Image (cartoon, rainbow, N blue to C red):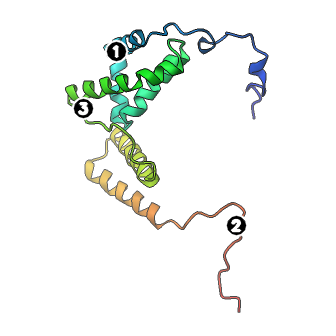
Amino acid sequence: MSFDGPIPGQSLTNEPRNHPWERPPETVDPDEAIKHHLTRFSKPKVMDGILDAIDRGYPVSMLTELVLSGAVAQGIHSIDLSMMIGPVVHEYLVNLLEEEGVEFDEFFPEEGDEDVRKSIAVSKAIKGIKESSGKPQEEEEELEEESMEEEMMEEPKRGLMARPEPEGDMS
């Protein structure tokens, strides 16, 4: 076990303004911030990363949040400004992907559909692993169906402190 992590409260003793987000942002103008993000999307390396994330099943809304959070962490603009320009950046990404003919999800499924989210994540992970192993498509579908059946057949989860159920009738 390693004890190399920060000590609780250590950030309160560090020198102030060590990090970009602790200093004033580079821009406070929404137009400049939007221009910054749109010019970044024109770079091939950035777009390759976005397309790779879309292929892995990330929705555009999540990518928008990641891009904006990264800009806040780098000190480019504030959190408030990212909330203001978020819809513009999101819409730009959607239009860009539609122009390129890329299939994508704009948002995650509804909040109540936690099982749907998990099954999407599992199936996409299995697909990624199988693509890298080079198995035929038929084998991939069979393995995916088997894993889904196994998930459905599992007994309901119980808490750590739950008492074991009696195996037979005690009377």
Q: Quadrant of the N terminus?
A: top right
Q: Earlier in the sequence, mark 1 or mark 3?
A: 1
x 50%, y 65%: residue: 154
From the viewer's perspective, tell me whether residue 75 is left or right of residue 10.
left
Q: Relative to 100, does residue 136 appear above or below in the rendering?
A: below
Q: Where residue 145 sits: x, y (%)? A: 35, 58
**Left or right: 16 as drawn, with respect to 88:** right
Image coordinates of residue 3 in percent, x first then y, are: 77, 29
Secondary structure found at label 3: loop
The numbered disc on residue 102 is 3
Q: Is residue 69 above or below residue 56?
A: above
- Asked whether disc 1 touches disc 3, contact meaning CB atoms under 8 Å apart, the reply is no
Q: How many marks?
A: 3
Question: Dot 1 surroundings within 10 Å: few (below 14), some, or many (20 or more)?
Answer: some
The relative height of residue 58 versus residue 81 in the rendered view (above or below) is: below
Residue 132 disc label: none
Q: Which residue is mark 2?
A: 162
Residue 29 percent coordinates (x, y): 45, 9
Label located before the other in sequence (3 or 2): 3
In percent of width and height, residue 134 lies at 31, 41
User: What distance separates the C-alpha of mark 1 from that of mark 2?
Assistant: 54 Å
Foreground residue among 150 and 96:
96
Name the kind of residue labelled 3 in the image.
Val
Question: Residue 49, located in which quarter of the rendered image?
Answer: top left
The secondary structure type at the circle numbered 1 is helix
Q: Disc 1 marks which residue?
A: 38
How crowded pointer 3 is (Cα within 10 Å; few <14, some 14-19, many 20+) is rated as few
Q: Are marks 1 and 2 in contact (CB under 8 Å)?
A: no
